[in-house]
Amino acid sequence: MDAFGALIEEGKLHEARPLLQAALLLMPQNAPALYYLGLLASEEGDLEEARSLLNRAALASAGNVSIQPHALEALALVAVQQGDRAEARRALEKVIEWGRITALLSTLLRTCGDRWAAGSGSDALLPGVGGGTG
């Protein structure tokens, strides 16, 4: 993963293709490899292949905030290019839901972190379980 990650960071997505394809041979549900290959297919105009790869990436990355929302956004763009507004809408609704979940988790972590820092200890996270008084 690190080898193609470095190439992707440098903007050398095309050079990463053989590594991405090898990663899929070893692990067919490799979400990052599926995602980046989907982006390549989209960039090259192969929208059917892009859609298939991005859909697989979204499914394979269920619960992975670093991949799934991006795969869904890319899937929505491909669906729009193909004229499938319903699919685009479904994908974007999932992205919006990810945003809501991320915002909620951020708020919870901030709140718990503030309580922890104020001396509430584990009661900040699990009131009544940690043995504190909070």
Image (cartoon, rainbow, N blue to C red):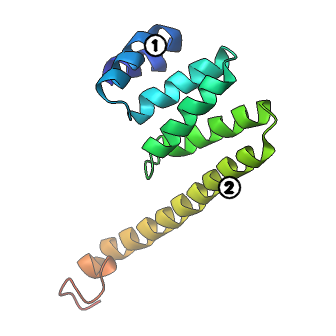
Residue most extreme to the top: 15
Of residues 36 and 118, which is closer to you in this image? 36
Of residues 129 and 132, which is closer to you in this image? 129
- Image quarter where the N terminus lies is top left
Give, as a three-letter code, the residue at label 1: Arg
The answer, for residue 16, to whether it is visible in the render is no
Q: Circle 2 is placed at which residue position? A: 93
Residue most extreme to the left: 131
Q: Position of residue 14 (x, y in %)?
A: 52, 10
Residue depicted at x 41% and y 19%? 20
130 vs 34: above or below:
below
Q: Is the residue marked by circle 2 packed among few (<14), some (14-19), or many (20+) residues within 10 Å? A: some
Residue depicted at x 37% and y 68%? 113
Q: Quadrant of residue 32?
A: top left
Q: Mark 2 falls on what kind of element?
A: helix
Q: Earlier in the sequence, mark 1 or mark 2?
A: 1
Q: Quadrant of residue 109?
A: bottom left
Residue depicted at x 56% and y 45%? 69
Q: Position of residue 106 (x, y in %)?
A: 48, 62
Q: Mark 1 falls on what kind of element?
A: helix
Q: Circle 1 is placed at which residue position? A: 17
In 3D space, how far apart are the residues under numbered discs 1 and 2 (Cα atoms)?
A: 30 Å
Of residues 4 and 28, which is closer to you in this image? 28
